[in-house]
């Protein structure tokens, strides 16, 4: 029986966002404090010089990977593959590496195919809560590390404990912290989604109602019609569970032939937006609780546009922004109707800050685009340095007046504050 969970109220999250706005950097997990990929920073540059904003520092020795940056307690955390081992890495705010601690074998070490070499490297972004840092590696090793020293506090082999199968591209999830619980998707017969105690790693609950291959996205928590729920995607459906006990609340079939769903859902106005690449398209769902607690799901719309591969989608007001797959380009969609408001060539990842979109093309061009549904309005762009092999797939972060961009072995920090 699980112990009572420390639930963090809405004011906590608002305060966390305000911290970043005051110049004390805090982006403690993948896509930030609210998992919505929106920075609270203001007073940022409205345009950049031709060569780009000032490069403050470059950190090397991170290994190969697509892990983004988490920021808390005056430190940055990321992950990378070094000599076929996944490592979690801590840096100070000047880019100096403070510690590197292994977190199990890399997915690439277990693959012989040539395409595995091209996609080698750590996937998930660490999550920080106080004195602990958590990270799920691509082969299912979940560890809690001491934030100051990198010492391992506990370890769970998720695929062994929950009898999960290794996904084709390795586990790519960034774990979600919910009070005293850590939520993740081992995708196993003994736990498709599970909650672990953040202090010990003990299992609090495990949902065994789903049998799909895992997706490559990360869960979010939201309240819909007064019901708090953890929402994510498998390879075949959008689903929600009760974060207090793990029971399945609702599910809706949605996916693509490649069984590759890598984009986190977005919840707004009691509706759930989901997207996946390989022509899976975009869908808006409206779950409703009926008498007796049963949920029904209405599909409001489904369109082929904005079939996001893995670069993420950002919501601003009633509009969605992101890149489609297979040369579909950057899109703005109307959240309520699914109608395309504009489209422009390109593909990559993005984040939002101070009324602008920071778009990272997968070939290494960073662009500043006004966040408006009226038209595509690119303001500035510059070419990033190369940090190693491969495409620029790590999601950018804007926090504390800085733009952080990871490519392979290196992390670049740019000053984007206005004078």
Image (tube, helix red, strand yellow):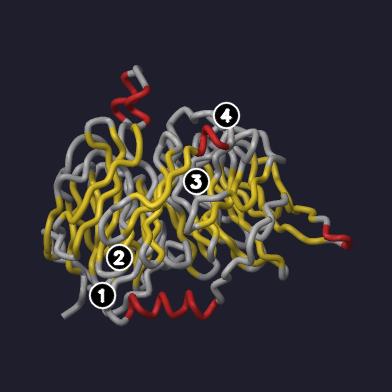
State whether residue 247 is above or below residue 257.
Answer: below
Instruction: Find disc 2 in the rendering and name its residue.
Output: 398
Please identify the quarter of the rendering in which residue 380 is found: bottom left
Instruction: Find disc 4 in the rendering and name its residue.
Output: 257
Q: Residue at x 62, y 40 (%)?
A: 192
Q: Mark 3 vs mark 4: which is more N-terminal?
A: 3
**How many other residues sit within 10 Å of disc 1, few (<14), some (14-19) or many (≥20)?**
some
State whether residue 180 is above or below residue 309.
Answer: below
The label shown at residue 217 is: 3
Q: Residue at x 52, y 64 (%)?
A: 319
Label 4 SS: loop
Q: Are marks 2 and 1 in contact (CB under 8 Å)?
A: yes
Label 1 SS: loop
Q: Mark 2 vs mark 4: which is more N-terminal?
A: 4
Q: Nearer the viewer, residue 182 or 171?
A: 182
**How many other residues sit within 10 Å of disc 4, few (<14), some (14-19) or many (≥20)?**
few
Q: Nearer the viewer, residue 44 or 18?
A: 18
The label shown at residue 146 is: none
Indicate the position of residue 376 as horizontal and vertical percent values: 37, 60
């Amino acid at each position: 029986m699980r112990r009572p969970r420390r639930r963090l109220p809405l004011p906590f999250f608002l305060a966390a966002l305000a911290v970043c706005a005051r110049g004390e950097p805090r982006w403690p997990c993948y896509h930030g404090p609210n998992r919505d990929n929106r920075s609270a920073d203001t007073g940022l540059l409205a345009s950049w010089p031709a060569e780009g904003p000032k490069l403050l520092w470059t950190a090397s020795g991170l290994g190969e990977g697509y892990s983004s940056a988490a920021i808390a307690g005056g430190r940055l955390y990321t992950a990378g593959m070094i000599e076929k081992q996944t490592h979690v890495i801590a840096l100070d705010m000047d880019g100096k590496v403070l510690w590197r601690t292994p977190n199990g074998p890399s997915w690439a070490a277990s693959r012989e195919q040539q395409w595995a070499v091209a996609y080698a490297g750590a996937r998930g972004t660490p999550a920080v809560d106080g004195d602990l840092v958590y990270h799920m590696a691509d082969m299912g090793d979940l560890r809690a590390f001491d934030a100051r020293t990198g010492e391992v506090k506990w370890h769970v082999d998720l695929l062994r404990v929950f009898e999960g199968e290794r996904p084709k591209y390795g586990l790519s999830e960034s774990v979600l912290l919910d009070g005293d619980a850590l939520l993740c998707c081992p995708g196993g017969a003994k736990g498709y989604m599970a909650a672990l105690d953040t202090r010990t790693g003990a299992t609090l609950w495990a949902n065994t109602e789903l049998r799909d291959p895992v997706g490559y996205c990360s869960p979010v928590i939201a309240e819909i019609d007064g019901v708090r729920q953890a929402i994510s995607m498998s390879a075949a459906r959008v689903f929600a569970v009760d974060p207090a006990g793990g029971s399945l609340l609702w599910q809706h079939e949605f996916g693509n032939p490649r069984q590759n769903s890598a984009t986190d859902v977005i919840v707004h106005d009691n509706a759930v937006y989901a997207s996946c690449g390989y022509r899976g398209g975009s869908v808006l769902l409206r779950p409703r609780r009926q008498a007796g607690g049963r949920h029904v799901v209405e599909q409001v719309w489904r369109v082929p546009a904005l079939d996001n591969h893995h670069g993420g989608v950002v919501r601003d007001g009633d509009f969605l922004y992101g890149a489609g797959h297979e040369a579909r380009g950057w899109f703005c969609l109307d959240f309520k109707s699914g109608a395309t408001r504009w489209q422009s060539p390109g593909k990559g990842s993005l984040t939002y800050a101070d009324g602008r979109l920071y778009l990272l093309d997968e070939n290494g061009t960073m662009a500043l685009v006004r966040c408006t549904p009226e038209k595509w309005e690119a303001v500035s762009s510059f070419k990033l340095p190369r940090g190693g092999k491969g495409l620029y797939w790590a999601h950018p972060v804007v926090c504390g007046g800085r733009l952080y961009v990871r490519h392979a072995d290196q992390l670049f920090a740019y000053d984007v504050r206005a004078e």
